[in-house]
Image (cartoon, rainbow, N blue to C red):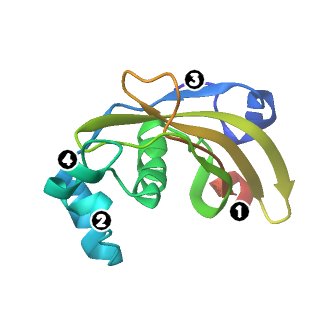
Amino acid sequence: MNINYHYDQLAEFVGKELGVSEWALVDQDRINEFAHCTEDRQWIHVDEARCQVESPFGTTIAHGFLNLSLLGGLMMQMGIVPAGVSSLVNAGVTNVRFKSAVRAGSRVRARASVHSVEPKDGGRTLLILLAQLELEGQAEPALTAECVAMLFREVTSDAVA
């Protein structure tokens, strides 16, 4: 992460890429766990035998919302929280587009850039990141989205005094 990526300099990062995460494996165990947690057990996600015969993908695919949910952790791993911030709270996701199926056994990673920065009262800033979940070996990302976060400025002893 850029050493100058700080709460006080956020506006300077608008339009700039923050980086990419490490690759994450989306295997059948992960897909099955997500299906269990969400109770979305549609055959295209969990029935490997049927998918070999009937699916246009030839195998099971990850849930779109599984792929979307991976973005948060991968972006945190990448270092999207600037210095000078005490906490970041998810404020929403907009303009989500599921563009490519993620077949079981694929690897994905996040890429993000700062789209906009909107100062709010009380030492808060609304940060919008343009994010994509890339599929290893594919030109088209699995998904794109605008991730909205509220940043809370770190309170220093100088600010308290």
x then y, percent, for residue 91: 66, 64
Name above or below for residue 141 compared with residue 54. Answer: above
Name the residue at 56% across, 44% down: 81
Question: Mark 2: few, some, or many residues within 10 Å (few <14, many ≥20)?
Answer: some
Instruction: Mark yes or no: residue 161 visible.
Output: no
Q: Secondary structure at mark 3?
A: loop
Circle nearer the viewer, 3 or 2: 2
Contact? badges 1 and 3 (CB < 8 Å): no
Mark 1 vs mark 3: which is more N-terminal?
Answer: 3
Circle nearer the viewer, 2 or 1: 2
Name the residue at 43% across, 51% down: 67
Residue sitting nearer the eye, 35 or 52: 52
C-alpha span from label 1 to label 4:
63 Å
Mark 2 vs mark 4: which is more N-terminal?
Answer: 2
C-alpha span from label 2 to label 4:
21 Å
Circle 3 is placed at which residue position?
2
C-alpha span from label 2 to label 1:
44 Å
Q: Which mark is residue 160?
A: 1
Residue sitting nearer the eye, 60 or 121: 60
Circle 4 is placed at which residue position?
52
82 vs 108, left or right, is: right
Circle nearer the viewer, 4 or 3: 4
Q: Secondary structure at mark 2?
A: helix
Residue type pointed to by label 1: Val
Contact? badges 2 and 4 (CB < 8 Å): no
Mark 1 vs mark 4: which is more N-terminal?
Answer: 4
C-alpha span from label 1 to label 3:
28 Å
Residue type pointed to by label 4: Gln
